[in-house]
Image (cartoon, rainbow, N blue to C red):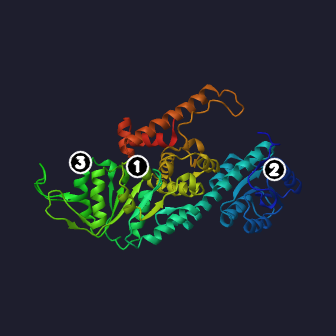
Amino acid sequence: MNSNKKRAFKKEGADQPLVVIIDDDQDFARLLERVIKRGVSCRTKAFTDGRSAIGFIKREAPEVVVTDVRLPDIDGFAILEATKKSSPLSTIILITGYGTIEMAVEALKQGAYDFIPKPFDNDRVIHAVEKALERTHLLRENVHLKSCLRSFSQGDFIGRSPRLRRVISLIEKIAPTDVTVLIRGESGTGKELAARAIHRLSPRAERDLIVVNCPAVPEHILESELFGYRKGAFTGATRDKKGLFEMAHGSTILLDEIGDISPTLQTKLLRVLQEKEIHPLGATKPIKVDVRVLASTNQDLEAKIKQGLFREDLFYRLNVVTIQMPSLAEISEDIPLLARHFLEIFGREYGREELEFSPEALKYLLSRPWPGNVRELQNVIRRAVLLTQANVITPADLDPESEPPLEDQAGGLLPYHEAKARVMERFVRDYVRQALELAGGNVSKAARLAGLRRQVFQRLMRQGAT
């Protein structure tokens, strides 16, 4: 590493990260200050006794503490323990001229980030402080995200962007009414989530929301599904069948992707909205229904009206109130909160609650285009939780399609065995991902598909190639 190239983690001046140095040799403490400040953009504060340092650490919560093990009043292990209690997000590095392997192991067991013996190499110290600052930054960023998640989680929605807050405010206003709502937005923006929020906040919430995925049901079946039929209405109708509108009596029905229904069904749906009644196939008289109708679409209905593919009168019946769900690009400031939310959900689901995002991972999420919107982000985080081998999610974990680099940082070719290990790691990650996708996320089923025992498959998930 080039020790002359400083790395800044915050702004200049008082906003720079703070590194506390503790050593009873004042000259050595000053030397350590100069070495660290020459390599890292940070503030430093040096102490020659442990008790004064502990009081300062308690007040200031520095990013990093670099302390000698042997001090005149208390030892470095006592400082380590005190720092963990008063400033748990600070990172501690121990330095000693009397180091042993046993002491180093004990320091790491008790929570030290690194253990450096004297005499030390300047670059080694600078590198350790850089990594310690990164760790503290990561911990504080994730604590901040968790705090924001609690502050900006509103019912079914996660976020603090002005666009999302306007959507939430509109939902809260219209939910207690019976007004028909058209929810518009790209795929993956949470249109069904908005519909569920409207229903949950409405007087009809005690009954289940009925969701109809219009494109998923063939046209000749969708009519009977929506309106029902009577025994003998057609060949095979051996009994009466209630339609979904009748089942939704007293509740709410969501017609998902309504732009895909046929003109015939559009006409019948218009009658339901106008007359508040349905006419089951084979019935001799209509049935009155008390149903609130919500509809969603990702299509340009105005363009379909001009093409003669969607009834204008039905459009105006549905479009009493419009909710426009923002794309993820329009609420990009909410990406870290959403990512943290999904990380917590999938971390609990897959037993990976120790996982955190690296600062670079969060930057990557903010810079990446999201054509699939929130649903795509959700899937990316799920995959990373399943396949990340370490406890920190990096940009590489979020972009499994990228080719494994076979060059070192200087641009030279990696040694054969290291390059092979990277390729194998990519192969294992892709294989495990495909097995899990085919198994619908079921680890036991994925292991059977791979012809492996569950324990072996889980080892591949977490450790990769060895």
Which quadrant would residue 76 be assigned to in this image?
bottom right
For the N terminus, give its image quadrant: top right
Residue 165 image position (x, y, % from top left): 54, 65
In this image, 319 relative to 95: left or right?
left
Amino acid, disc 3: His
- Mark 3 or mark 2, earlier in chain: 2
Residue under label 3, please give it.
Answer: 220
Residue under label 1, please give it.
Answer: 304
Q: Say the numbered circle drawn on residue 124.
A: none
Q: Helix, strand or loop at disc 2? A: helix
Residue under label 2, please give it.
Answer: 36
Q: Nearer the viewer, mark 3 or mark 2?
A: 3
Residue 154 image position (x, y, % from top left): 50, 67
Could one spot residue 69 in this view of the protein?
A: no
Q: Which residue is drawn at 56% across and 61% down?
A: 163
- Mark 3 or mark 1, earlier in chain: 3
Could one spot residue 342 in this view of the protein?
A: yes
